[in-house]
Image: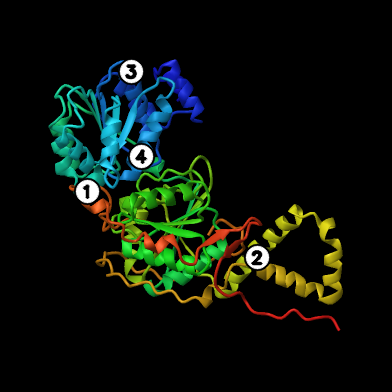
Amino acid sequence: MKFKELGLSEDLLEAVTDAGYEEATPIQAETIPMVLAGQDVIGQAQTGTGKTAAFALPILEKIDKSNPNVQALVVSPTRELAIQTQEEIYKLGRHERANVQVVYGGADIRRQIKSLKNHPQVVVGTPGRLLDHIRRHTLKLDHVQMLVLDEADEMLNMGFLDDIEDIIKQLPEERQTMLFSATMPPEIKRVGVQFMQDPKHVKIKAKELTTDLIDQFYVRSRDFEKFDVMTRFFDVQDPDLTIVFTRTKRRVDEISNGLQARGYNAAGIHGDLTQKRRTQIMNEFRHGKLDILVATDVAARGIDINDVTHVYNYDIPQDPDSYVHRVGRTGRAGKHGVSMTFVTPNEMGYLREIEKLTKVRMLPLKPPSAEEAFVGQLGVAKEAVADLINKTDTEKYADAAKSLLDEYDAEDLAAALLNAVTKDDNSQVPVKITPERPLPKRGGKRHGGGGYHHGGGNNRRGGGYHRSDRGGDRRGGDRRDNRGHGSRNHEGGNRSHRSNNGGRRSEGGSKRGFTIRKKD
């Protein structure tokens, strides 16, 4: 359905066009007319289905831009999602000059108080920080006409339900309420019954939540083998932009540090990092300055980047619904994506539960050997050399090149060049990942190994959620959010980057040794 069929103003339609949207997604097509008609709405949809615009556009249509009071409130579970939602609403409302502000824990509250004095019509925030402002009387909600509870199930999992109810009690009874959630546990349904007026239910079917553009694989691997197996897949598949999901904050630090030590361009994100560091990492990943982002599920909520090519589930999820959240980070905007889930032998029951939910049979992959990984590295190096030759003014170096060819064998010179643009040998750097307690055993038939492996450096053909990361904004979130644990793991050390010639290089570490023979 076209946006112009939804009853939006010309200014908003222009903003939609500027944002690059062409047709409304299912959640937008169903939700926007209902909200414009004044109805309360419960939308059941995953991240990446366009739900932000589904509530942002009708909010911008209905608020009075000449009224300086807060007229719409959006409650988000994490800082990242709150910031991203504010940016999206601001982008869509800039032609109408809508004033949108965001508040969240872990940031200077005095600066937020100052921004709230600028009379925003829309406020986006995390529960803990919103309550702080309400109690300080720096946020007045007497004129709120529209309330949005975004990612409601995630706010429930993070322990925010009491905070949400406290916030709702500060709002006028005569208002419009929108609730969005990927799942509908009883507690969320109770919120709908208690605080909404005859809500209309919009549910996006599971087949629209998992896309045919994503190839889904699993790899049987014991826990202590996962890291080496995963890095070999990196070398064979050569992913462009990758998210690695893991279960705990400790694993985020250990995996990201291990990847950096082995020459990969990686960083980790979780709730104990300072807000400044989290923002820096996300900006680097969004703009392609990082190849690999390692994250917990909670920290990764709100990441909406269309260019992610691969998702690796280092730890399988305990909750099968969350698998859709993870793999939904790739295969976006009509682009092809790959998801890979590492499964220990006693976790096969969880894999089968995921397959039941998604109605997709994951294909097994055989872990690549060290030799196959090296072949993949060489494939990337050869492409980098070809790019380098195309960019080089060879005439300028002709005399020096002739001198080298007179002194050294041509094959040895080419081998030295390949060595220079090939990433450090993975096997040279030991990495220890602390074992985690196994998931409780889940029923299901045991399936044997086997499988297959797609080789080749450029072959793209070859998740889930244990909510143990409670980082982010919680009640009293300022105390928790200001802890900077973990940031030291990323500020220095052996960092790596993608070199200008297209290959991955590390600033430290040893290269494969070989000898260039002089000609006799």
Which residue type does callout 2 highlight? Val
Question: What secondary structure is found at the residue carrying circle 1?
Answer: helix
Q: Which mark is residue 222?
A: none
User: In the rendered structure, which amino acid carries the disc numbered 3?
Assistant: Lys
Q: Quadrant of residue 408?
A: bottom right
Along the line of sight, the residue nearer the viewer: 28 or 400: 400
Q: Indicate which label's residue lies in the foreground, 2 or 1.
A: 1
Q: Check disc 1 and give the amino acid type.
A: Gly
Q: Are marks 2 and 1 in contact (CB under 8 Å)?
A: no
Do the numbered discs 1 and 3 sit on residues whose CB atoms are within 8 Å?
no
**Left or right of 140, for residue 379:** right
Q: Is residue 507 left or right of residue 398?
A: left
Residue 392 falls in image quadrant: bottom right
Q: Quadrant of the N terminus?
A: top left
**Circle 1 sits on which residue?**
477
Label 3 belongs to which residue?
Answer: 65
Q: Which residue is mark 4?
A: 83
Which label was assigned to residue 421?
Answer: 2
Give neighbour class at mark 4: few <14, some 14-19, many 20+ (Cα, 10 Å): many
